[in-house]
Image (cartoon, grey):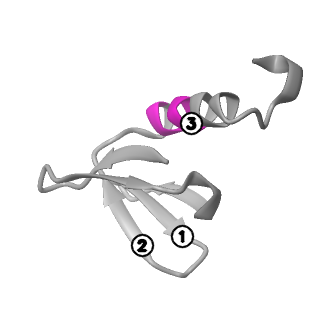
Amino acid sequence: MIKVTRLDGVEYYINPHQIESVEMKPDTTLLMLSGKHIVVREKVDELVDKIVAYRRKIGVFGNDV
């Protein structure tokens, strides 16, 4: 799970494997596989870094850890 922050400042965790796409509209908007849209404060680059770190932590990248 990765921590994200809604625009109102509330922090919560999401499963990055459930993210279908990320858009800048101009706010960062996550489109989840469920069809739900989540608008967050984090920028796209920050989200990518969090996702990569999470995937390394759980061993998805194999020898890239």
* Most frequent secondary structure within the magenta stretch: helix
Relative to 45, residue 30 above or below: below
Count of numbered labels shown in the rendering: 3
Question: What is the distance, in whole Å, between disc 3 and disc 2 at their CAs?
Answer: 17 Å
Q: Are marks 3 and 1 in contact (CB under 8 Å)?
A: no
Q: Residue furthest front?
A: 58
Circle 1 residues within 10 Å: few <14, some 14–19, many ≥20:
some
> Is 40 part of what is drawn in magenta?
no
Q: Residue furthest bottom?
A: 35
Q: Circle 2 is placed at which residue position?
A: 37
Q: Are marks 1 and 2 in contact (CB under 8 Å)?
A: yes
* Residue 7 badge: none
- Write down the region rendered in magenta: 46-51
Q: Circle 3 is placed at which residue position?
A: 48
**Percent x, y of residue 6:** 24, 55
Q: Are marks 3 and 2 in contact (CB under 8 Å)?
A: no
**Percent x, y of residue 23:** 50, 56
Name the residue: 59% across, 28% down. 53
Q: Nearer the viewer, residue 50 or 30?
A: 50
**Percent x, y of residue 65:** 75, 18
Q: Circle 1 is placed at which residue position?
A: 32
Circle 3 residues within 10 Å: few <14, some 14–19, many ≥20:
some
Q: Amino acid at mark 1?
A: Met
Name the residue: 63% across, 29% down. 57
Nearer the N terminus, badge 3 or badge 1? 1
Query: Which element carries disc 1, helix, strand or loop?
Result: strand
Quarter of the image holding residue 33? Answer: bottom right
Q: Nearer the viewer, residue 36 or 16?
A: 16
